[in-house]
Image (cartoon, coloured by chain):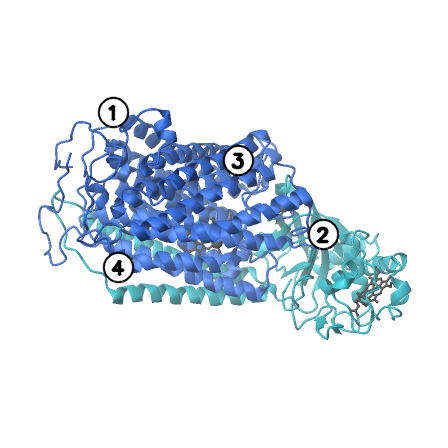
Amino acid sequence: MEEFEVPRPPRTNYLNAEYGVKSWLLTKDHKRIALLYLGGISFFFFIGSLYAMAIRLELLTPQADLTQSSTYNKMFTQHGIIMVFFFLIPSIPATLGNFLVPMMIGAKDLAFPRINLLSWYIYMLGGILTIYALLAGGVDTGWTFYTPYSTTFSNSYVIATGLGIFIAGFSSILTGLNFIVTIHTMRAPGMTWFRLPLFIWAHYATSLIMILGTPVIAITILLVAFERLAHIGIFDPAAGGDPVLFQHLFWFYSHPAVYIMVLPAMGVVSELIANFSRKNIFGYKFVAFSSLAIAVFGFLVWGHHMFVASQSIYAGMIFSILSFAVAIPSAVKVFNWTATLHKGSISYDTPMLYGLGFIGLFTIGGLTGMFLASLATDVHLSDTYFIVAHFHYIMVGGTLLAYLGGLHYWWPKISGRMYPEGWGRFSALIVFVGFNLTFSPQFVLGYMGMPRRYHTYPADLVSWQVLHVLSTAGASILGVGLLIPLIYLIWSMRYGRIAEANPWHLPGLEWQTASPPPTQNFYETPIVTSEAYEFAPPEAKEVVGRFERQRPVKI
Amino acid sequence: MQSSFPFIPESASTLSGDVDAVYFYISGVTVFFTTLISLVVIFFVIRYRRRNPFEIPRPIEGSTKLETLWSVIPLVIAMSIFVWGAKVYFAEYRPPKNALEVYVVGKQWMWKFQHSTGQREINELHIPVGQKIKLIMASEDVIHDVFVPAFRIKADVVPGKYTSEWFEATKPGRYHFFCAEYCGMNHSGMGGWVVVMEPAEFENWLSGNVSQLSPATAGRQMFESLGCASCHGANGEGGRGPALLGLFGSNVVLNNNQTVRADEGYVRESILNPQAKIVSGFGPIMPSFQGQVNEEQLLQLVAFVKSLSTTKPETPTTKPPVNANVKPSAPH
Ligand code: HEM
Ligand SMILES: [Cu+2]
Ligand SMILES: [Cu+2]
């Protein structure tokens, strides 16, 4: 890419403003806190991935090879718990969101910097407690903690793990609260609601779910703990309780939680698609409001996880029709991203490759949701590998890809260095291929009838093993594809090319300050006079030539 | 369970074809839209690739017309899937008349089946082809689930109530069934075979296995040994407690003037938690038998109470069967 400015020698920025462990552990700077989160989240992602590899290896053959069933059950449970509660839920909001929400709206920091730091400590405390539970003996209930197995029958560390999740939930609530207040009160002059980048809209919608939904899961976990300790009889039928009540409470949070995981990813992808095709997003307001629609209507469809759980057929029908309805705003987003590419100037940089990959995989993930929202087919597919494939398409194909894309996109801003572009593109390709090879066979497996959470499967079903072997092969490729960025991103922090303030030549506010930014983000409060993604004035003709709206960087 | 196409599961029940039809319809929609989006994206990405590092394309405003179009078309398609899926599901869950009933009890980690003629089986279920079979299912511990991929049916087995599912097999053969709700250590081992036989062969199998009492007869013995007879009469004709003759399938008036349909779930609740619903004209004197009978014995008592109403159809046919703890309109 052509250079617009000569890279500057190092000057003071948020990374070198202070030194020492204490300056990090007591920092109130949202950018440093984002990096603390990045460290924590990467750690948990790494642990979760080790479990995933072990699961895939075990499934290579129909019989038990590596572990006993009790260990296998702990592996998939711990994989799920770590990935959902300690990676996916905090991933984008706590790292990219924390770093960028203030920068994108032209603020110096979040509204409550101390609470922001507190949220990291709470997250780590919850995480450490959970890791302790895993080391002490582990937990084997599945990440869904279904009763009465979790309350009465499991002999594993349910309470300690639950407490870890309970505590980590508060960090979500605090982060959500911080974002909402910041977005409401700290926008720079001229930054009206409809000038906000879509990343901000997505985080606003996510924050609403975090605040409204998380208390429900917190209470539910407490009830499970009480039931285990004191046997109060809420969920245990022997004591007059109702085990299905748990599923209602659990999914009342956990369905919206899937949108906590994917809405920020949609925000990232809106940024990637618009910026790397140098176009304003097609249908800005529709994309923005579809996030809110998803956040609100996502609370009305939890029962679609319980179509075969002895729910009445009439309840099933209502949840089914609502689930179909909630898919529409997601479809609208996909169409708008695609339309944004039309007549753009599309670059093939790594972040854009991830963004385009997201569109494809999220489309598949969303469309396969239809099989599960439709009652007749869900009866067959529920609790099979089809479910596993569906949500991995959304959460790995969607959220993880967007996270990686976002990380590459903002890496120059975060670290002040460029990542190696060639390696970036190469690994994005490997991830895409590996991912599809891992999870597309699982759709077929599910249709064939392979139940999820199975340690062994019948040896007479040869096609099942063929599909499992494909899936494990894909997982190995995916693993390599994820290790490469881990290595070169760390490498680039020291050896990467020094990044310009605005290496991609973009109009977003976060690019109008130095890379890495100073502690106070901007040298002077920016004044916003244009829409988001305004590369050219709206009245401009086909090609308006050289991009001129860059602000000079003051040093 | 392997069919002639290696990656399509065997289809062996009257409804499996209907489910597959919906499945293929949605597959068509999925493939169509995935291909459409991918092709358009690939086309744009190649056609509008950045040719010059300084080019700035002309901004394009959104279009409300297009937005409406691509909201409404998916919505219409989605609704068509909903209607079709719901229709098939309704058939899947509405229990048919004159089904052969099989009692199923799941416990960590095995399945026990009992035919109405008394035969018991473990992890294997023999049934005749071309005959509607209804499973009435209970769990002794955690939630399990009976899933027969070849029949495309699945239903959770929830402790504390009865759930049910039905099917009619169309081809003799051996079909895998699985527990599809995670239930602890040996969950993946908690499955077995459904053996579908020609009717004559099935009769043969039945007569080779008659060593046990039928559930109703076993239930009658328990009715006496547990002392139910002292209140309800030796033949269920009534006494201090209401008559049980003709009870099953009828509408019971309660002391709060509500009516309840007496199905398996109601009888179950009457035995385990008699205070929950008191029959009009009687006092709350019936003791609870919670803890004194296990799920299998409970099913036998229910079978006995049912057998006292054989003048009526075996199962209520106008409405789906009812959960114990849930309102009467709830199925399974
Ligand atoms: C776009 C429309 C979507 C529809 C119609 C849809 C539909 C469904 C349905 C009906 C189920 C339950 C299936 C069952 O348990 O039998 C399900 C499972 C799941 N979905 Fe989706 N989904 C959609 C999008 C998403 C998104 C955006 C996410 C996450 C970001 C997601 C994550 C999940 C997860 C995690 C599960 C499985 C949970 C579990 O049982 O462990 N889905 N989906
Ligand atoms: Cu859901
Ligand atoms: Cu099971």
Residue B34 point in image, percent of width and height: 35, 54
The color chain A is rendered in: blue
Residue A130's label in the rendered image is 3
**Chain of the residue that carries numbered disc 2 in the rendered image:** A
Q: Does the CB distance between marks 1 and 4 fall below 8 Å? A: no
**Amino acid type of the residue tagged 3 in the rendering:** Thr
Separation of residues labelled 1 and 2 (CA atoms): 64 Å
Front one among A113 and A392:
A113
Q: Name the chain letter of the residue that bears numbered label 4.
A: A
Q: Are marks 1 and 2 in contact (CB under 8 Å)?
A: no
Judged from the image, the secondary structure of the residue bearing numbered disc 2 is helix
Label 3 marks which chain's residue? A
User: Cβ–Cβ below 8 Å for labels 4 and 2?
Assistant: no
Q: Earlier in the sequence, mark 1 or mark 2?
A: 2
Real-space Cα separation, disc 3 to disc 2, in angstroms:
29 Å
Label 1 and label 3: CA atoms lie apart by 35 Å
Front label number (4 vs 2): 2
Q: Is residue B246 above or below residue A273?
A: below
Disc ID at residue A495: 1
